[in-house]
């Protein structure tokens, strides 16, 4: 499974199903389930858009997998109040976001990274309905094109 490290309080907003866009400087070809990892250093100056109360970052877990979200597509720009101009909007399906009951401690990495198998097993124990084959496990869920025909008939 693929994961993305996100600073708190943004990781909290994603897994709670509030934040529908993750701002990134690069695109990704990955589509489907994305494990959300709360990075070790929170963003203490972060403020949520209107309508949402920003939680105290000292109460949120860090250096841990906190949930999963469904990466639907990547665009720029986007109308979401969470979108930050000049970035790519990684659009998340907030109805499919899910917070873990107990965060799984682990170190993160930059960019999209592969979750080690032992952590995938721990994740599945908390979310038994999560299946990698359900469009987005270890492969990007990009529709494959049918093979091209050469135009020649077989002899």
Image: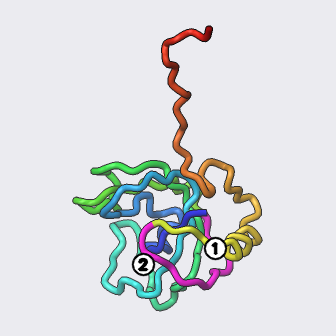
Residue 31, percent across and down? 51, 51
Q: Where is residue 131, by image quadrant? A: bottom right
Q: Using the image, tell me which numbered label, if any, was put on residue 116.
A: 1
Q: Is residue 149 left or right of residue 86?
A: right
Residue 53, percent across and down? 41, 75
Judging from the image, what secondary structure is the residue with disc 1 in?
loop
Q: Does the magenta stretch include residue 99?
A: yes
Residue appearing at x 47%, y 74% in the figure: 5
Residue appearing at x 61%, y 85% in the figure: 105
Q: Which residue is denoted by mark 2 in the rendering?
A: 7
Q: Is residue 37 left or right of residue 79?
A: right
The C terminus lies in quadrant: top right
Looking at the picture, tell me which residue is in the foreground, 63 or 148: 148
Q: How crowded is mark 2: few (under 14 residues within 10 Å), some or many (20 or more)?
A: many
Judging from the image, what secondary structure is the residue with disc 2 in?
loop
Its colouring scheme is rainbow
């Amino acid at each position: 499974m693929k994961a993305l490290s996100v600073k708190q309080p943004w990781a909290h907003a994603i897994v709670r199903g509030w934040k529908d866009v993750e701002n990134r400087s690069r695109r990704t070809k990955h589509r489907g389930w994305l494990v959300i990892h709360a990075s070790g250093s929170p963003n203490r100056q972060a403020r949520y858009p209107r309508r949402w109360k920003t939680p105290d970052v000292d109460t949120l877990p860090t250096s841990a997998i906190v949930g999963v979200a469904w990466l639907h597509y990547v665009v720029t720009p986007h109308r979401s109040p969470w979108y930050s101009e000049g970035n790519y909007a990684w659009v998340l399906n907030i109805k499919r976001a899910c917070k873990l009951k107990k965060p799984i401690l682990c170190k993160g990495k930059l960019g999209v990274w592969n979750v080690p198998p032992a952590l995938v097993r721990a994740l599945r124990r908390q979310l038994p309905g999560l299946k990698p084959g359900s469009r987005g496990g270890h492969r990007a869920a990009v529709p494959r094109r049918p093979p091209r025909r050469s135009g020649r008939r077989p002899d």
